Image (tube, coloured by chain):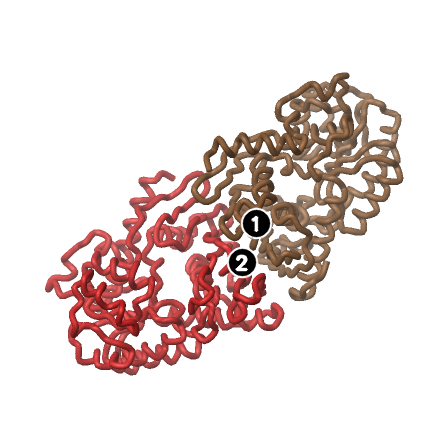
Chain colours: A red, B brown
Amino acid sequence: MERRKFTKTLITSMGALGLSQNLMGNALLNNNNKKLGIALVGLGNYSTNQLAPALLETKMCELKAIVTGSPCKIPQWKTKYGIMDHQIYNYENFDAIANNSEVDIIYIVLPNNMHKEFTLRAFSAGKHVICEKPLALNAQEASEMIAAGKKANRELYVGYRLHYEPHHQETIRLCREQAFGKIKHFEGGFGFRAGNPNQWRLKKLYGGGALMDVGIYVIQGARYTIGEEPIAVTAREYKTDKVKFSEVDELIVWQMEFPSGAVASCTTSFSASTNHLFVAAEKGFIRLSPSYTYNMIAGYTRGYSFDFPQVNQQALHMDGISNHLINGVPHLNTGGDEGLRDMKVIDAIFASAASDGKRILI
Amino acid sequence: MERRKFTKTLITSMGALGLSQNLMGNALLNNNNKKLGIALVGLGNYSTNQLAPALLETKMCELKAIVTGSPCKIPQWKTKYGIMDHQIYNYENFDAIANNSEVDIIYIVLPNNMHKEFTLRAFSAGKHVICEKPLALNAQEASEMIAAGKKANRELYVGYRLHYEPHHQETIRLCREQAFGKIKHFEGGFGFRAGNPNQWRLKKLYGGGALMDVGIYVIQGARYTIGEEPIAVTAREYKTDKVKFSEVDELIVWQMEFPSGAVASCTTSFSASTNHLFVAAEKGFIRLSPSYTYNMIAGYTRGYSFDFPQVNQQALHMDGISNHLINGVPHLNTGGDEGLRDMKVIDAIFASAASDGKRILI
């Protein structure tokens, strides 16, 4: 298969998913030029270096407010993004955002233990919510957040950026169409070396740990390539540094069993770098390596590689959500229900790891 | 690091390992031009398409006999390799090879359940033995084979060809020198789609199954990159086709724990293709993908790929063994003791898989 064919089929499939407009910058969808206003809650690395720059590229939404507990961060946001005083909130006066008609969507980029609280407060303020992954600390919290959204008649989305990434989209398409036959096996790993020992990702209180932070991408990858929901999980946890990782998981290896018999073999780590997705089907395979990065994602299969353009995943994701809210165009499966499914798997992985690898039904 | 440096350090390290002579075709080592005679026992695919052609390239050994239970195969070996009548044996009269002074080494390329019997018979005939992997059906058999070799004062080697493959050698060197710091994690998978449902690899009697056939390469990879012996194993077995794989393992996912805390996460399959080795260290990684093939092996690490020449692994391996026998130059860790170590791991993997993933100490 030639690259041209891939590019063509990609565009076709993206069209079918209602996405071509985003990539092509089609203004027809947004006739009134109204952009949705987004408030970023939490001005850490991801907001600062990914989301705010992405919001300079979005066509259907824009940065309209910031929420931070660190006043020292404010001046640079004023300078860089023209943020005005009435667009600035802290965690105490956040609820007053209900009165800010410029803001349509609250994007929660806080430590994991704060996701539920701020999602509920955002719904109370009448806003839609995008919550960073993982959606919550566990499935119970995630369910409460979904229920709160329904009650408030507002939408809940999860920061699953890779659904808007072309290599992943092509991988999903090839899997759905069984281009290489039935899927038999998945292997995936996402890990990095967590440097600073004081970061919240290493604290239990904040919902830290490798699985919650990056392992979730591997769960996602297995689920959206195999295209089924796992029915059972087995997991093992390992520690090489019991001081640094005294509170959270350093390395978890787990397996997921799917109804078709496909099995996913997965790894996540805070002490070593790994970044790949591999799907083995009856007659071929697909590999993404690296797979979960913001750019440089590369795809391979038998005999050829597929090299789509690197896109601004965050910009496409936020535009996809805005397109859903403005025009009712389906988003690419990044809703709260999808977040809940992953939390159920995460709960099962922790349960298995805590019981010496016992098989946990989901 | 540039490719030139890699090439240079490779050659240096190969020299240190006593291997440069093989690669460089240095005749000094073999002054008397005596080549060791090899008998191939079992004329299946591996003998026919790999070992016999390799023996046309070896400098220190040559094909001097064949042993087969299929007379119909004989004419092509006569034509292609000039095999003469006195160089042909079957499984019944094999022991008469004791009287054939042309034969120094018996290379056993039979189904796994016949390894022990023919190794013992070869030692009784006063010959050295190369036995294909896995060395035996289990560690007990492997120990008996090693003991028999010691008693007969003859050498036992295993068909571990990858120790003579430059990408693997470079990977081992980088790991040993801790080029990227301490090794934290290993991921590896080797699987293929076993087509013919009647092949011996799918029969329990013959010692079939994915783990014995190709999973052993992943065990090897983990052991020679991490450079330690595993202390515990956990494993899970899965079947998607209970008819085809009624007798042997179709898919096994296992973990190995090493004394340093490093963990290996491994996969083997007879229903899907996977072929990779990944080592994550503190400050970097090494990936071989594909990793276990006869050629096309490719290495990657951060910022560069290492593309050494594809070599004839089997020829280098058999020359390395011959060099050991003729000149006492150390072989590259492909002895019977290495085969036994893998069998201990395999025994533990089967024990864990049979006990619902229980942690088995080795």
User: Looking at the picture, does residue B18 appear above or below residue B261?
Assistant: above
Seen from this angle, which residue lies furthest top?
B32
Seen from this angle, which residue lies furthest front?
A72
Q: Categorize mark 2 by other alpha carbons within 10 Å: few (<14), some (14-19), many (20+).
A: many
**Residue B294: image x %, image y %?**
59, 35
User: Looking at the picture, does residue A336 appear above or below residue B178?
Assistant: below
Q: Amino acid at mark 1?
A: Gly
Give the quadrant of residue A119.
Answer: bottom left
Q: Categorize mark 1 by other alpha carbons within 10 Å: few (<14), some (14-19), many (20+).
A: many
Which residue has dot 2 on it? A265
**Residue B246: image x %, image y %?**
66, 56
Give the quadrant of residue A124.
Answer: bottom left
Q: Residue B55 versus residue B8: which sits nearer the camera? A: B8
- The answer to whether residue A255 is seen in the rendering is no
Give the quadrant of residue A41.
Answer: bottom left
Circles 2 and 1, Cβ within 8 Å, touching? The answer is yes
Work out whether disc 2 and disc 1 sit on a shared chain. no
Chain letter for mark 1: B
- Mark 2 to mark 1 CA distance (whole Å): 10 Å
Q: Residue at x 81, y 27 (%)?
A: B104
Left or right, residue B129 beside residue B12 = right
Q: Secondary structure at mark 2?
A: strand
Which residue has dot 1 on it? B189
**Residue B5: image x %, image y %?**
50, 33
Q: Amino acid at mark 2?
A: Ser
Left or right, residue B242 beside residue B128 = left
Chain letter for mark 2: A
Q: Secondary structure at mark 1?
A: strand
| Numbered marks: total | 2
- The answer to whether residue B95 is seen in the rendering is yes
**Residue A285: image x %, image y %?**
47, 47
Q: Residue at x 83, y 31 (%)?
A: B127
